[in-house]
Amino acid sequence: MRAQTSPLLTLIAVVIGGAILFLLLCAGVFLLVNPFRAPTTVTPASGQRATVLVTQVVVITATPAPTKPGAATAAPPQPTIAPQGTTAPQPTTIYPTIVPTAIPLSPTAKLTPAPNEPLTSVSVSTEGGGTGIRINVRYADGSPARDVYSEVYRQKQDVSGNPVRRDRIASGSTDNSGTKSFDVPPDTYVVAIGLTGYLYGEQFNHQVQAGTIRVLDVTLGQILVGVLDADSKAVQDRYVEIYKQKPDLSGNPVTDDRVASGSTDNTGAVQFNLTAGDYRVGIDGLAGDPWGELFNHRVTSGETNRIIVRLGRLTVGLKDASGKPIGDRYVQVFLQKRDVAGNISQGKRVSSGSTQNTGLLNLELTPGRYIVEVSDVGKLIDVPIESGRITYSDGASFELQ
């Protein structure tokens, strides 16, 4: 006999089953929509295409341009990030900054200008504290040059555009300090300074601006000419002339205008204060061959060019067979030259004199080789004369001592 099931138990079972089914359904829905589920790697089956959503990140890596040796290296460029949904910016190349390396230059003392470089005696500068022109003139030893006359002209142009003098607006001489100042308004000026020799430098285009002073510092050079005899004693009253020089068509120097002259004093010397340039120097009263090179005696600012001429001496001593001196015997000295065969021939006479009652005659000559003729005795050729030395002759022979 089958047992009877209670309607109440059946109802309870149905309710519990439905609840369990409902809970299972809720759990399934929960798992489907839960955004915090663990990531799952899905491998598509063969023949299927996987769709993957990727957040766009653009990283731009710029390679720095090569740098020059010794240049500073720039920092690498930073990456640019483009947000989602926008177009990534184009990469910008950042080149490193090239820092030039300074090359230290050693100061070079320029003692003598280059052969073709113009010589000048002036340096020009600008100072504050007023409006005008100031001229400072110094000798080679740095002492002030007094009473140097200067003129200031306004400047204009000729029809070719070259600067020329206009009207003179100021003039005057340097004081005891070697200085002369001119208060002139702003303009462009010509400055003429009365100095011996070549132009002191550029005379034109001296610009004066308001509140500034155009300063011309002029430093002269010097030529000192000295004459000494064979005993190294001073020779006085030798006349010296200084000339400018210029080139001929072949570029060789020839004599230009004379700019100074004077005679050696009891010190045996004479000095000339000159502007920079190359000069011709002539010394009169010296018997014999040329005393040296006449041309290209260079004068530079602040320096002294010393030209010292030391003579030699010819001493002629005559005596008779008994040893008594022979006076009043005429002696002549000639230049000598050689012909194309090398033979010695007589040139012009450069010195002469007669023996005294002592039988002696002394003649001061420049260094060289000479022909010496003694009346009623004979003629000697190729007689040497050297600086600071004495050549003895008895008319028939000679000896250099």
Image (tube, rainbow, N blue to C red):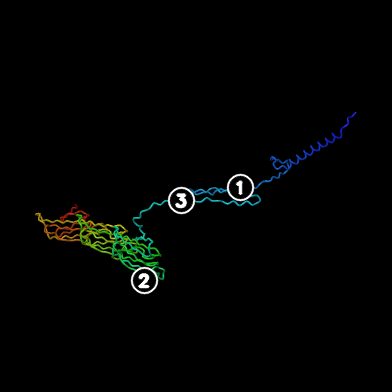
- Check disc 2 and report its element: helix, strand or loop: strand
Between marks 1 and 3 in the image, the one whose residue lies nearer the viewer: 1
Closest to the camera, between mark 3 and mark 2, is: 2
Q: Please tell me whether mark 1 sits on a helix, a strand or a loop.
A: loop
Residue 16 horizontal/vertical position (percent): 81, 36
Q: Nearer the viewer, residue 75 or 290?
A: 75
Question: Badge 1, how many Cα within 10 Å: few under 14, some, many 20+?
Answer: few
Q: Earlier in the sequence, mark 2 or mark 1?
A: 1
- Amino acid type, mark 1: Val
* Farthest residue, direction right: 1
Q: How crowded is the residue under tag 3: few (<14 C-alpha within 10 Å), some, or many (20+)?
A: few
Question: In which quadrant of the rendered image does the N terminus lie?
Answer: top right
Viewer-proximal residue, 370 or 190? 190
Q: Nearer the viewer, residue 3 or 185?
A: 3
Instruction: Identify the residue position indicated by label 1 in the image.
Output: 59
Could you give the CA–CA distance between mark 1 and mark 3, rounded to whole angstroms? 35 Å
Q: Which residue is mark 2?
A: 167
Contact (CB < 8 A) between labels 1 and 3? no
Asked whether residue 40 appears in the rendered view, the answer is no
Q: Is residue 117 left or right of residue 361?
A: right
Using the rendered image of the protein, determine whether residue 151 is visible from the camera's viewpoint.
Answer: yes
Q: Amino acid at mark 2?
A: Asp
In the rendering, at what x and y percent does residue 68 appear? 50, 49
Mark 3: which secondary structure? loop
Which residue type carries mark 3? Answer: Thr
Q: Rounded to the nearest whole Å, what is the CA distance between mark 2 and mark 1? A: 77 Å
Disc on the earlier residue, 1 or 3: 1
- Residues at circles 2 and 1 in contact by the CB criterion of under 8 Å: no
Please tell me which residue is depicted at 27% across the width and 64% down the height of the picture: 260
